[in-house]
Structure formats: structure tokens, C-alpha cells
Amino acid sequence: MSVSARTLRLVPVALRELAVGRVVDVTSGMKRITMTGSQLGEFTSPGGDLQPAFTSPGFDDDIRLLFPYPGESEPVLPVIENGRVTFAEGRRPIARAYSVRRYDSESRELDVDFVLHGHGVAADWARRARPGDPIHIAGPGKTQSLPAGCDWFLVAGDDTAIPAIARLLEELPCDARGQVLIDVAEDDHRQELTAPEGIEISWIPRHTGTRHPLLNAIRGVNWHDNERFAWLAGEQAEVQKMRRFLVKERGVPKSDIDFTGYWKRGAAGLVGQ
């Protein structure tokens, strides 16, 4: 089995204007914002092109949220023609990538979860968000299926990966087996997750001060030598350390590891979530 077994499908990108429909505190460190609007269905763009309905079949699909520059009320928007994104002359849009936690095509509700640690354009917007607030989104531009032919899953990520991890666990087959490791800032940031009985979930609070908590947890995993798939996400450098360990110390083929650096320590805001 290899990551190539995750069927990749490109999706035409549409720019959609939505509104905040609901705001819920999932934990003290995460806020869920439900976005709604007619443009989640098919609609005609200002240029007269018919845009497809929003879709998100993959557990780790992400979208771009577009935010105004400080002191401004309207975001700089990209130019999208024939599903391709370009930029007009002048300032580039301020965009942040976030996972699609849930999408209901019947109710046209799109859930996005925001980690509230620190400050950044997206987290600050989420703290202030109220029903009726406008928000523009674009994407997803691609989506991937669940891995095929996998007997055992290793999933590891920090707070920023919880939305994708939660959705993965909900979409795994009922006979799936594996180990899930989640690094959170505080004990009360844990969430109730729905998972198959064969999946073991371990929460690792960062406040203990242990360096590289996810890497240390992976070192202690009771490894399985059957067909396996590893999904890693979180801080860029930590993800690279975990991947390097799996490849060099556990002998996992690179093709059997899917990894994403959702953010970079020392950088302003998330580079992808």
C-alpha cells in the first residue's frame, strides 16, 4: 500500500461569499464557526460563469479564507477564471488555509474550527465573529480519498490537526485499527471524538514541558508490520522530525506517509491548516 492509493481529484476553484451562521466554543482553545450562504450551491459569478456547488469529500480537504487588511473592512479578492486563481495588480489577498471540519450539502452548512492560541488574522477574526458577519472562501482545489488496502493507521498531530483527524476517524471503516496521537496545549482542550473500536486515541498535553511530545509518543507506539498508513500534521519542523523517524528508524516507505506542515514556529499566522 502507498499514499498513491489515495485517489487525487482536482476541483475547480470558486470564490464564494458566505456569512457566519453560528459560533460555538468547542473547547476553551477552539472555536467552531458555521458558514452558510446560497453560494455553497451552484451560482453565477459576476463574470457570468456558472460555478459548481461546494464539495468536500476528503477528510483533509482545505479551503482558503480571505480576510481584510488591518484597518479595512473588505478583503482583497483574487481573480478566478475557469477554476484558476490569479491576482490583480497591487496587493495580494490575505488568505489562510483551514480544514473543512464538516459540510452538509442539504442545509448548506460549512463548519471550520479555529485554534485560538496566540494572535493572527484568522484567530482574531474567529474571536470576534458573530452571526451575519461576511466571509469569503475559495477552494478546495483538490481532494483525496481515504487510503485503500490499509490494515493499520498511525495518525499524529497537534491542535491544528484535530479537525482533519476528527473527520478522518468519523469516515474510517468500522473495522479500522490504529493509533492516534494528539498534542494539545492544555488538558481541557481534549475533545470527544467518534472512532472505530480498533482505534486507540492518546492525548498528550504540552504543558508538561516535554520536548517533541509527538515524536516521543511515536517512539513508544506498539508498531505493526502489516499494511500501514501514517498521516502526520502540525508544526512544520515537528512533522519533519516524525516523518524522518518513521523512515529511518521504523523503515516505513516514504510513499506510506502523508504529512503536512500546517504552521511554522516563529511565522505570523498559519501557513496551512
Image: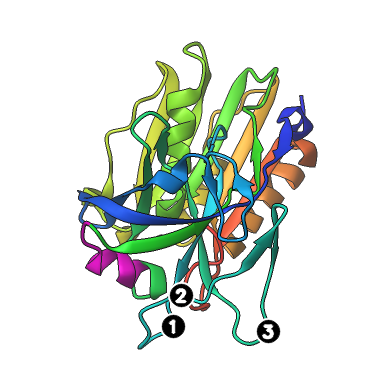
Say which label, 3 or 2, has the lower sequence index: 2
Say which label, 2 or 1, has the lower sequence index: 1
Q: Is residue 94 above or below residue 221?
A: below
Residue at 44 percent across and 83 percent down: it is 69
How many numbered callouts? 3
In the image, 132 versus 38, the foreground residue is 38
Per the model, the C-alpha gap separating discs 2 and 1 is 7 Å
In the image, 189 versus 65, the foreground residue is 65
Crowd class of label 1 (few under 14; some 14 to 19; many from 20; radius 10 Å)? some
SS category of the residue bearing label 3: loop
Residue at 50 percent across and 65 percent down: it is 96
Q: Give the percent coordinates (x, y) of residue 147.
A: 66, 26
Q: Is residue 252 magenta?
A: no
* Disc on res. 75: 2
Highlighted range, magenta:
123-131
Which residue in the protein does label 1 denote?
A: 69
Classify the position of the N terminus by image quarter.
Answer: top right
Disc 2 and disc 1 in contact, CB within 8 angstroms: yes
Crowd class of label 3 (few under 14; some 14 to 19; many from 20; radius 10 Å)? few
Residue at 56 percent across and 55 percent down: it is 45
Which residue in the protein does label 3 denote?
A: 89
Amino acid type of the residue that numbered disc 3 sits on in the rendered structure: Glu
Disc 1 and disc 3 in contact, CB within 8 angstroms: no
* Disc on res. 85: none
Q: Is residue 30 left or right of residue 172?
A: left
Amino acid type of the residue that numbered disc 1 sits on in the rendered structure: Tyr
Dominant secondary structure (helix, strand or loop) of the stretch shown in magenta: helix
Q: In this view, does 245 lie to the left or right of 189?
A: right
Per the model, the C-alpha gap separating discs 3 and 2 is 15 Å
User: Does the image show residue 31?
Assistant: no
Amino acid type of the residue that numbered disc 2 sits on in the rendered structure: Pro
